[in-house]
Amino acid sequence: MSIDKQAIKMHIRGILTALGEDPDREGLKDTPDRVARMYEEVFEGIGYTNHEIAKMFNKSFQDDLAVDQSHNDIVLVKDIPVFSYCEHHMALMYDMSVSVAYLPTDRVLGLSKISRICDMAAKRLQLQERLGSDIAEIMMEAACTKDVAVIIHGKHSCMSARGIKKPAVTVTTTFRGQFDTNTVLQNQLFMMLK
């Protein structure tokens, strides 16, 4: 699915008019085009399923790793900065930090692929809770493992800039496989996150 930039431009122009603005004034005349180009970039992930994202970023290294599956060797990439847009208000979810851990089976993902997975999953109209589930699902497929943990810290402008106007931090956890059932492994992960 490609983003219909012409439709976005038309609707943004209509929103400007509905707000009581003159969409032809100097400061606004290029705004519909700028917003359409911005939406094409920040909502890029809408055009892909989780499966397609996993296929895009599943570059792995098998020859360089001798994984002993009798141990729980955690791979953790933490504090990956992302942003997204809340699907309820189309408001920015900002200062988001994603940490992703997994137990490798017979291969490891390139570390940059984990950041790219987080970024692409965030480039959708999202809920923070769903974002964690999407990242976990993509990681499970891309890394060929059932054992994934995703921890997200984020602020939501729909809370900080309007309504209650409190910039609280929302923390979500998504645990799959052994991260969901093994409290020793969870505790080890939380120690690594400090």
Image (cartoon, helix red, strand yellow):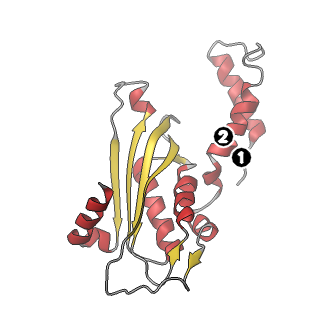
Question: Residue 56 placed where, x, y %?
Answer: 64, 67
Amino acid residing under circle 2:
Tyr
Q: Nearer the viewer, residue 100 or 33?
A: 100
Are the two marked residues, 1 and 2, in contact with CB atoms closer than 8 angstroms?
Answer: yes
Compared across the picture, whether 5 is left or right of 178 comes to right
Question: Residue 166 placed where, x, y %?
Answer: 34, 27
Q: Residue at label 1?
A: 3
Residue sitting at 36 percent across and 72 percent down? 74
- Residue 100's label in the rendered image is none
**Does dot 1 land on a helix, a strand or a loop?**
loop
Question: Residue 176 placed where, x, y %?
Answer: 35, 69
Give the Cα distance between marks 1 and 2.
8 Å
Amino acid residing under circle 1:
Ile
| Whether residue 164 is situated above or below residue 63 in the rendered picture | above
Q: Quadrant of residue 25?
A: top right
- Residue 39's label in the rendered image is 2
Q: Nearer the viewer, residue 113 or 147?
A: 113
Q: Give the number of the mark in front: 1 or 2.
A: 2
Residue sitting at 32 percent across and 87 percent down? 70
| Whether residue 182 is situated above or below residue 71 in the rendered picture | above
